[in-house]
Amino acid sequence: MDQKRPKYHSPPAIRQRAKELRWPMTPAETALWERLKNKQLYGLKFRRQHPLHHFILDFYCHAHKLVIEVDGGIHQQQSDYDEARTEWLTQRDFKVIRFTNEEVLKNIEAVLQTIAKACNVME
């Protein structure tokens, strides 16, 4: 018997907003995207500003159900929302890792190493 996989379709408004958020990106998002795009990190495919259900994920690797969030100052004011969103995702077996803008801009190699470890692809 085939088990149906859950679908996390996004409403059209969320998909449209995700497209709008792809340009312009924050400096931290841009720096990280430059290192993730085109399968540069161990051949992993990442999507940016990916719509999922009613959320827009900064970066997403479908093969490993990995969600990467890059948090700027606004996230200090919306920590309850971020926690609820992370809980919703983890309850559905998504892995969520968060980095601050400063971490990405000042130590991108460590950020990339953390991402690779989360996908179990370290050399």
Image (cartoon, rainbow, N blue to C red):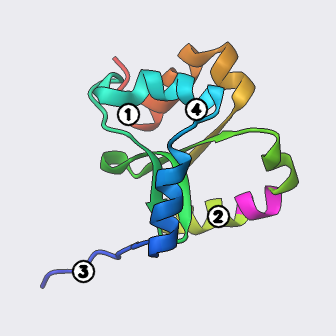
State the mark number for residue 85.
Answer: 2
In the foreground, 48 or 22 = 22
Task: State the separation of the CA atoms marked 3 and 1.
Answer: 26 Å
Circle 3 SS class = loop
In the foreground, 26 or 103 = 26
Q: Quadrant of the C terminus?
A: top left
| Magenta extent | 79-83
Instruction: Tell me if mark 3 has few (under 14), some (14-19) or many (20+) residues whose alpha carbon lies within 10 angstroms of its own.
Output: few
Which marked residue is nearer to the observer: mark 4 or mark 2? 4
Circle 4 SS class = helix
Task: State the separation of the CA atoms marked 4 and 1.
Answer: 23 Å
Residue 95 in sight in this render: no
User: Residue at 46% of width from left, 53% of height from top?
Assistant: 19
Closer to the N terminus: mark 2 or mark 3?
3
User: Residue at 51% of width from left, 67% of height from top?
Assistant: 14
Above or below 87: residue 19: above
Residue indicated by mark 1: 120
Circle 2 SS class = helix
Residue indicated by mark 4: 29
Task: State the separation of the CA atoms marked 2 and 3.
Answer: 23 Å
Report whether 96 appears left or right of 75: left
Quadrant of the rendered image containing residue 79? bottom right
Residue 22 in sight in this render: yes
